[in-house]
Image: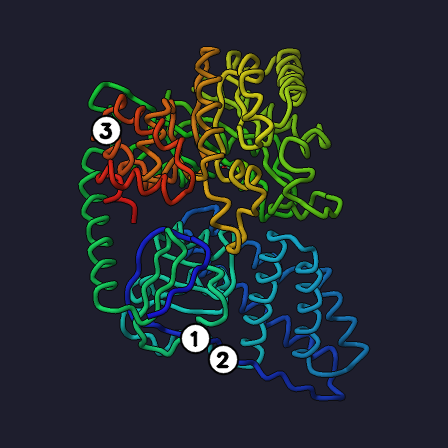
Amino acid sequence: MKKYQGVASSRGIAIGPVFQFRRAELVIGTCENQDPFSEWKRLDSALETARKQLNQVYEKALNETDEAQAEIFQFHIMMTEDTDLLDRVKNSLEDRRTNVEPVYMEVCQGYADELAAMDNEYFAARSADVLDVANRVLRILMGVAESPTAGLIVPSVIVADDLTPSDTILLDKTLVLGFCTAQGSTTSHAAILARGLGLAAVGGAGSDVLAFKNGTGLIIDGGAGLVIVEPDESTVNTYRQRAEQVRTLQVEAQKYAHEPAVTLDGFRPEISSNIGDVAGAKKAVGFGAEGVGLLRTEFLYMDRPSMPTEEEQYQAYKAILQEFGTKPVVLRTLDIGGDKELSYLKMDPEMNPFLGVRALRLCFKHPDMFKAQLRAALRAGVGYNLKIMFPMVATLSEVREARKYVNICRDELKAEGIPFAENIEIGIMVEIPAAAVCADMLAREVDFFSIGTNDLSQYTMAADRGNPGVANLSDAFQPSVLRLIRDVIDASHKHGKWTGMCGELAGEPLAAPLLVGLGLDEFSMSPPMVPVIKALIRTLNAKEMKALATEALEKETVEEVRGLVRNRVPAAAAVEG
Ligand code: PEP
Ligand code: MG
């Protein structure tokens, strides 16, 4: 038995035999003295076939996941029509007069390399998309069948170097228990798709996993980012029991998904969801979410050739608000930068993008873009319970500046006679330690806080949230992070304001007792966790949890904090998996 620590890509446990996912190597030969025109025609017809295939993949993705995730394949379709790239192929064909395969491959590889060289996770993922499409077109040109899973006949855990989005969507879900990749990160498209499909997944597990033989026993723990090869019997039994226990609890919890989460002594936090689009909104409602604690609007801007207009955004926000009726929906303004970029928005290269012109800082540099989003939000909010939240706030001046934009938009809409929501709550994400430390100051000028523990952990601990090598540091159970969380909640309450949490910690069963103890007013998490956390909270006594939280804040390590909760609240430990 051997363990490998990777990155937690998609929660869940998968136990089964290894199936190595290997694509047949394409051997591309060069034939001289070819007619450029007929080679171009061959490529044109292969591109047409690729588009037809991709449309089918897009439809499959729409059925199995949601619109935002299916959009990846729209990007693939667009790539088959990219005139700049195809012009490069055409010119090169005329110069070299060879068959089209090596020319097309070289041009695509060059483009993919350009994207990968940007040293940015988002573009690195797009680079993989370019090669994914190039491989598809080359397979069509060369008449090579596409089926790296032809030998997959028993339910297995897929092991691969990396999985492209189309690999992931084309996997036969009746035979795939989960997957583990040597490369990849939490933000790779394969990881996002896995979460949407409810498949357990671990990324970044290292190249050793590629040596596992087909049929070898494997456990992947997607929540912990752990891969265990050749597990002994007792480990298999432990994980089986955990998986079974979690499944039973989930089924049981879903029966009461639409009931509120009230502790034994009457404390009733709001349990909401993090979503990115209408499909997510429908899912959240089905799982009993009492609202949206984080609407990640950046997905509306990504994987498309141009900026969404104010009207498009207005329609998109309205469609989401309609799903929730009078329930609160917290719309977070654009959080681009860091690991997320927009192909159509020029951004200067940065040494440390996570510490650079990201989110609100970027919006201030693009006032028209920011105003279009605020106007769309203010308009969509009419008749609904919409709240606006600014990400990456570090100073009070930024809050004032952002509020100024809201006021400008209100004045403009008023002057134009366009209806807009008059009394919208304005809040901020507390995800930079500076904001947490000065929370008392900020609380005077905002209506609410939402703690973004994903970033708050990485910035407090100076540990990249996407780097498996420092995952033990960028852990929200670190005493320093927990103390900041306590201070933020206390500061807001002192000023009569409320605090929510939309970082991953809010959906962590082991954190729920502590967050109840600290008096967190709103928990926002991925939709499937809503019934589970609600059920757990119903078993707790808030006064007892307050004492537990006080004790936890005196602990010196993450292990001690987790150990304390596991010991005192077995119900939380039971759903941890
Ligand atoms: C966070 O930082 O905790 C958060 C919720 O925002 P994101 O993960 O989108 O950065
Ligand atoms: Mg964040």
Residues under numbered marks 1 and 2 in contact, where contact means CB atoms less than 8 Å apart: yes
Residue 319 in the image, given as x and y percentages of width and height: 45, 31
Task: Classify mark 1: residues with Cα within 10 Å, few (<14), some (14-19) or many (20+).
Answer: some
* Mark positioned earlier in the residue sequence (3 or 1): 1
Q: Which residue is mark 2?
A: 24
Residue 359 in the image, given as x and y percentages of width and height: 62, 35
Q: Is residue 33 left or right of residue 543?
A: right
Q: Is residue 474 left or right of residue 255?
A: right
Q: Residue at x 57, y 27 (%)?
A: 390
The answer to whether 85 is drawn above or below residue 549 in the figure is: below
Type of the residue with mark 2: Ala
* Mark positioned earlier in the residue sequence (3 or 2): 2
Q: Which residue is mark 1?
A: 148
Type of the residue with mark 1: Pro
Q: Residue at x 39, y 50 (%)?
A: 196
The answer to whether 45 is drawn above or below residue 416 in the figure is: below
Q: Nearer the viewer, residue 146 or 534?
A: 534
